[in-house]
Image (cartoon, grey):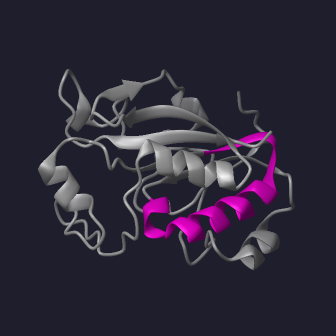
Amino acid sequence: MLLKQDIKVVVGAGIYNNNPGWIHTQEEDLSLLDKTQWTEKFKENTITAILAEHVWEHLTYEEGVEAAKICFEFLKHGGYIRCAVPDGYFPNEEYQHGVQVGGPGPKDHICAGHKIVHNYKSLTKMFEDAGFEVVLLEYCDDNGIFHHKEWNGKDGVIFRSKKYDPRNQGDKLGFPSLIVDAIKH
């Protein structure tokens, strides 16, 4: 549970403000790959939570590990990154066409900036390579079967999720995300 004095940061906040009380940043304010920007804004081991909704797919695998290592330095012990990316194992051809590297994206979202499409294995390994323990919250397995673990929006709302996105209500998924909590122990 987050306390009022906790520092909570949304990276790549975009137009969304799903997390009142969090510090919302854009890439020009706080680049995941620019440690100097982090150092100017935060002390090491002081951030409780970082939320990144559809940000990490704009990094290569290697850049993703580097970004995770930078975040790791600034998170408190027990702090976490809640990360959501397009799910490479979601069995929907239209979805996969939209989120592919260089793809057109869903409805007016250009995905040309996508450098990778993660699945639960690659995203887990990326964060583990940076020193995190990973908890899978929402994901499709190798057979395209969707899995969902209960998670609390108070710890970071991911709009493009089974829990919050109206496209994903009922038995049909329209636009799921692969969502993990990467925890610093």
Q: Is residue 45 above or below residue 185?
A: below
* Residue 111 located left or right of residue 61: left
Q: Nearer the viewer, residue 136 or 41?
A: 136
Q: Nearer the viewer, residue 144 or 19?
A: 144
Q: Residue at x 21, y 21 (%)?
A: 170
* Residue 175 located left or right of residue 128: left
Q: Indicate the quadrant containing the C terminus: top left, top right, bottom left or bottom right.
A: top right
Q: Is residue 159 above or below residue 31?
A: above
Residue range (magenta):
55-81
Q: Residue at x 25, y 65 (%)?
A: 109
* Residue 23 located left or right of residue 148: right
Hey, which residue is sitting farthest front in the picture?
142
Based on the picture, tell me whether residue 110 belongs to the magenta stretch: no
The location of residue 4, given as percent across then percent down, is 76, 37
Q: Is residue 84 visible?
A: yes
The kind of secondary structure the magenta stretch mainly shows is helix
The location of residue 178, given as percent across then percent down, is 41, 43
Q: Residue at x 27, y 60 (%)?
A: 99
The location of residue 69, given as percent across then percent down, is 72, 61
Q: Residue at x 86, y 59 (%)?
A: 44
Q: Where, by quadrant of the figure, is residue 105 drawn?
A: bottom left
Based on the picture, tell me whether residue 68 belongs to the magenta stretch: yes
Q: Is residue 106 visible?
A: no
